[in-house]
Image (tube, rainbow, N blue to C red):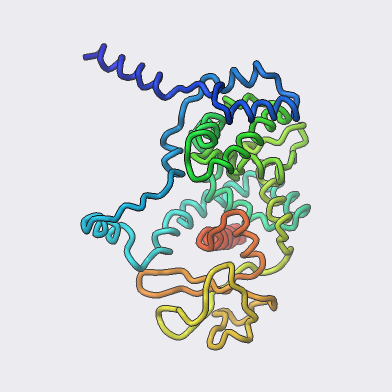
């Protein structure tokens, strides 16, 4: 029995490893790296000769099935994803008490860095901390996928985002040279995102900051990660000192009077019957209506320009709202101490 198990393990390892050096797309990518960026062919061939195919990552990007669901499958989906309560389910872990407490501890541990970064980039420390909390649980979960193997799999195995991942793979290999790391030794998400803030390689290059001034951008280190997230938000036009979002009132339990979501903007004067729940909300620009679907009612919010900036980090209104609400709770608790 033991021999059979060992044999199966060996076979699995052999099947999961793949030589991409003869793949025409790999050859084209290697040629480009050699001609434009000074890489050595032998070094690249060594990298691509033994790639562990990341099938679990690949499954996330395969074309969605167009098969008609059976009644039983439909019933299962209804139970798993009921019509109402999407925000309740989404926010349950992202804005938990433990995550707030961890965020406060993280800020206090790196207080000096946060203060310097906030002064330089104009982004409040609690928003940076909230992003790190949601993206990587303050560095405890930066991902277990080998980034090089993952990006190679997603670049060259057929899926709906091959072109995107080919570009990211190219950037990642370039980064391994400029930032002096072994591309086989970096781990990240199932999509190849890296570090405390889960930057894709192209964002690493565009927004990464060597804040500790050691000659390398290392997004697994708090100094560089904190500054890089702030730089990302600033370059996407974060407005220093402005509001982010506030809850508003409306008549009824479900809202459908106006289009909602971060893509739709309104002047507040046209939004009849909608007002901030707090007496004073110091913001006069155009707003977005953000609807949070709860089990028994819709929660409605105004989203300001800075709310939209957060959606540049992740194109989801729920994501941006979870960052905002977590940040507010972190700030409240910091002020208590």
Residue 272 vs residue 67: left or right?
right
Q: Which residue lies furthest to the front in this view?
A: 24
Decide if residue 250 is in sight here: yes
Q: Give the mark count.
A: 0
Q: Residue furthest top?
A: 3
Please tell me which residue is depicted at 53% across the width and 63% down the height of the picture.
Answer: 317
Please tell me which residue is depicted at 43% across the width and 47% down the height of the picture.
Answer: 63
Please tell me which residue is depicted at 26% across the width and 59% down the height of the picture.
Answer: 74
State which quarter of the image contains the N terminus: top left
Q: Is residue 208 above or below residue 304?
A: above
Q: Splitting the image into 4 quarters, where does residue 243 fall?
A: bottom right
Residue 179 vs residue 245: left or right?
right
Frontmost residue, 91 versus 97: 91
Frontmost residue, 154 versus 172: 154
Q: Is residue 209 above or below residue 332?
A: above
State which quarter of the image contains the C terminus: bottom right
**Where does residue 274 sit, x and y in percent of width and height?**
54, 84
**Where does residue 206 sit, x and y in percent of width and height?**
71, 45
Residue 21 vs residue 8: left or right?
right
**Where does residue 302 sit, x and y in percent of width and height?**
58, 74
Frontmost residue, 198 versus 103: 198
Decide if residue 337 is in sight here: no
Q: In this view, does 218 lie above or below 131?
A: above
**Where does residue 36 sit, x and y in percent of width and height?**
75, 30
């Amino acid at each position: 029995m033991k021999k059979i198990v060992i044999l199966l393990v060996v076979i699995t390892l052999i099947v999961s490893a793949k030589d991409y050096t003869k793949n025409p797309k790999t050859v084209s990518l290697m040629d480009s790296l050699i001609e434009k960026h000074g890489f050595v062919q032998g070094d690249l061939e060594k990298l691509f000769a033994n790639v562990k195919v990341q099938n679990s990552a690949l499954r996330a990007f395969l074309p969605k099935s167009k098969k008609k669901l059976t009644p039983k499958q439909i019933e299962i989906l209804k139970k798993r994803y009921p019509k109402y309560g999407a925000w309740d389910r989404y926010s349950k872990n992202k804005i938990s008490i433990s995550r707030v407490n961890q965020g406060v501890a993280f800020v206090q541990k790196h207080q000096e860095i946060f203060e310097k970064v906030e002064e330089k980039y104009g982004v409040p420390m609690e928003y940076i901390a909230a992003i790190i909390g949601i993206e990587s649980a303050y560095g405890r979960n930066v991902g277990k996928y080998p980034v090089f193997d993952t990006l190679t799999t997603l670049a060259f195995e057929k899926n709906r985002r091959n072109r995107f991942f080919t570009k990211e793979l190219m950037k990642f290999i370039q980064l391994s040279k400029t930032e002096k790391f072994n591309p086989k030794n970096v781990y990240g998400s199932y999509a190849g995102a890296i570090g405390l803030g889960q930057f894709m390689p192209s964002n690493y290059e565009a927004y990464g900051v060597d804040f500790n001034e050691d000659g390398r951008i290392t997004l697994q280190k708090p100094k560089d990660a904190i500054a890089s997230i702030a730089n990302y938000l600033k370059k996407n036009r974060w407005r220093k000192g402005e509001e982010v979002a506030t809850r508003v009132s409306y008549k009824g339990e479900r809202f459908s009077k106006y289009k909602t979501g971060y893509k739709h903007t309104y002047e507040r004067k046209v939004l009849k019957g909608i007002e901030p729940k707090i007496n004073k909300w110091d913001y006069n620009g155009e707003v977005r209506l953000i609807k949070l679907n709860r089990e028994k009612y819709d929660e409605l919010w105004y989203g300001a320009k800075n709310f939209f900036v957060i959606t540049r980090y992740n194109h989801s209104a729920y994501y941006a709202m979870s960052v905002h609400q977590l940040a507010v709770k972190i700030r409240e608790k910091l002020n208590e101490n």
